[in-house]
């Protein structure tokens, strides 16, 4: 067994009473003394501080022009990179030659470079992938010296503005670099909870001071990975390695909104990304299966791996994420089903501990999102 | 009250054994959101999975600590699973077992031994 890595704020989490568990090779706080339920509800009502420093941060500096680098990124993702304005962030997907998803990520156009934030469990893979494909056009600068904090919830904007007044003017998916007493912070107005909020990249040396400064602000409490998972599930957001992976295409995963017009058939830069044949065909003809939201009718939570069936017993697929939604106050799940059964309201059955129980295909998000657009 | 290595407690009440989960277990599970109870009248063997308890984090099985017949279950847990966190040693009992010989509980840990066990 390999040793677990520690976050820069490891001792700080212990001081806060965080219960540390292994996740993606790191020791991570799964919860603090308040517990998953209270932490989840706190984020929906006020503001929560998450340490997501396990995620990969990488700056791509063009060796030539930003346009050349943007085009090179478009050869890795079915996403409109050139169309992303300076100061803006967008959701992206690295796809494989067979049209599966290698990772999902956020990328930001910062004028003279691109900043990418990728999943912890995939960062080694992603950095190698970037090195192999972009080495000629970009300097690939992995940000090992930075922590990443997320401040999420309806009071996040007011709280962060006490320390960084500039954030008041930011809208959803804006990015900014700001010099602060904590060092130069890279802020995006985004997150993984369905709430308004920010992700804040901060030099490791200033990270603990920033976390302490945020936690004394009104409404801000520390939140663990447990609530991060239930919040993103209620928001209908995918977790890599569970809801999406190398076998699922972006179309099957119902992430077609992430494939802008420019990259689709008839678009200005149609195709030209890995897995183009499968992805464009699925966009045209529909996928054979699709990721859907699911609402178990009873109270029993249905988790990853639970098999899904049509009411006549035909196997349809399986749940990929599921649990209890503290804000929804009911069990919720996501999973893949054959496309003919993917319409909201379709009655299905799920096999839980040997019993077939009713489940209904439902719209996501399960809880209304409150992004500051 | 006696305690098992699976973090259940047993209490003799009249000629029955009442079973629940310990405070330590309830705290480790976190907020309980669902309890699936066995049916009254079920014959169980020691180690049988008789009940499922789900928290926001995970699902866990409740095992029958000894052989016997489940003669009553706590329906209040179906409507209010949070009782397991509020009062694990009292209101949140899971089931009552009828056994041949009540001395079967003697094999389990007493409170001091259980405290040592969980460290």
Image (cartoon, grey):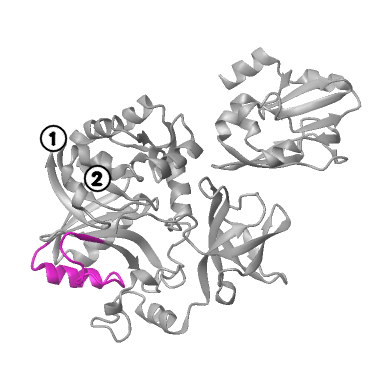
Q: Is residue A87 left or right of residue A336?
A: left
Q: Is residue A363 magenta?
A: no
Name the image quarter holding the C terminus of chain A: bottom left
Query: Which x, y percent locates residue A92?
Result: 31, 64
Please give the count of numbered marks on the rendered protein: 2
Residue for point 28% across, 48% down: A198
Query: Which x, y percent locates residue A152?
Result: 34, 45
Query: Which x, y percent locates residue A169?
Result: 19, 52
Chain at tag 2: A
Q: Work out whether mark 2 precedes mark 1 in sequence or the reverse, and give the earlier one.
A: 1
Q: Which residue is mark 1?
A: A181
Instruction: Give the Cα distance between marks 2 and 1.
Output: 14 Å
Q: Is residue A85 magenta?
A: yes
Residue interval drawn in magenta: A62-89
Residue for point 44% across, 62% down: A244
Name the image quarter holding the N terminus of chain A: top left
Q: Do the dots labelled 2 and 1 sit on one chain?
A: yes
Residue B51, compared with residue A118, is above or below; it is above
Q: Which residue is mark 2?
A: A200
Q: Given the current orientation, which residue lies at the most extreme top position?
A: B112
Residue A173 — which label?
Answer: none
Q: Is residue A162 left or right of residue A295?
A: left
Q: Given the current orientation, which residue lies at the most extreme bottom position?
A: A266
Q: Is residue A21 left or right of residue B14?
A: left
Element type at mark 2: strand
The image quarter containing residue A344 is bottom right
Residue for point 33% across, 74% down: A274
Chain at tag 1: A
């Amino acid at each position: 067994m390999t040793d677990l890595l520690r976050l820069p704020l490891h001792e700080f989490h212990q001081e806060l009473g965080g219960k540390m568990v292994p996740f993606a090779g790191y020791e991570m706080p799964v919860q603090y003394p308040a517990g998953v339920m209270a932490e989840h509800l706190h984020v929906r009502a006020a503001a929560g501080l998450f340490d997501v420093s396990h995620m990969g941060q990488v700056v791509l500096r063009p060796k030539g022009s930003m346009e050349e680098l943007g085009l090179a990124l478009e050869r890795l993702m079915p996403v409109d990179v050139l169309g992303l304005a300076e100061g803006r962030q967008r959701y992206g997907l690295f796809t494989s030659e067979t049209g599966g998803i290698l990772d999902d990520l956020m990328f930001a156009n910062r004028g003279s470079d691109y900043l990418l934030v990728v999943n912890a469990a995939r960062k080694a893979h992603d950095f190698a992938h970037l090195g192999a494909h972009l080495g000629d056009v970009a300097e690939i600068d992995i940000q090992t010296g930075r922590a990443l904090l997320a401040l999420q919830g309806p009071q996040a904007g007011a709280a962060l503005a006490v320390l960084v007044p500039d954030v008041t003017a930011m809208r959803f998916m804006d990015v900014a670099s700001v010099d602060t007493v904590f060092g130069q912070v890279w802020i995006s107005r985004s997150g993984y909870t369905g709430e308004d909020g920010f992700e804040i990249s901060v030099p490791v040396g200033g990270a603990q001071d920033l976390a302490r400064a945020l936690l004394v602000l009104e409404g801000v409490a520390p939140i663990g990975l447990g609530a991060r998972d239930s919040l993103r599930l209620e928001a209908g957001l995918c977790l890599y390695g569970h809801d999406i992976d190398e076998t699922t295409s972006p179309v099957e995963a119902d992430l077609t909104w992430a494939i802008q017009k420019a990259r689709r058939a008839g678009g200005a830069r149609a195709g030209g990304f890995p897995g183009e044949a499968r992805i464009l065909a699925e966009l045209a003809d529909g996928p054979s299966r699709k990721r859907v939201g699911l609402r178990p009718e009873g109270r029993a939570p249905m988790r990853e791996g639970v098999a899904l069936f049509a009411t006549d017993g035909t196997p349809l697929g399986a749940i990929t994420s599921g649990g209890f939604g503290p804000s929804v106050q009911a069990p919720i799940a996501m999973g893949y089903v054959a496309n003919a059964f993917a319409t909201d309201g379709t009655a299905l059955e799920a096999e839980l501990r040997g019993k077939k129980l009713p489940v209904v295909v439902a719209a996501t998000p399960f809880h209304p999102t409150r992004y500051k657009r | 009250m006696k305690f098992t290595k699976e973090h259940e407690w047993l209490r003799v009440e009249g000629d029955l054994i009442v079973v629940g989960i310990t405070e330590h277990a309830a705290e480790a599970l976190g907020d309980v959101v669902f309890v699936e109870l066995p049916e009254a009248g079920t014959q169980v063997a020691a180690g049988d999975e008789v009940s499922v308890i789900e928290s926001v984090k995970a699902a866990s099985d409740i095992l029958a600590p000894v052989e016997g017949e489940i003669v009553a279950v706590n329906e209040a847990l179906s409507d209010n699973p949070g009782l397991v966190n509020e009062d694990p040693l009292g209101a949140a009992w899971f089931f009552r077992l009828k056994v041949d010989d009540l001395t079967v509980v003697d094999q389990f840990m007493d409170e001091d031994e259980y405290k040592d066990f969980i460290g």
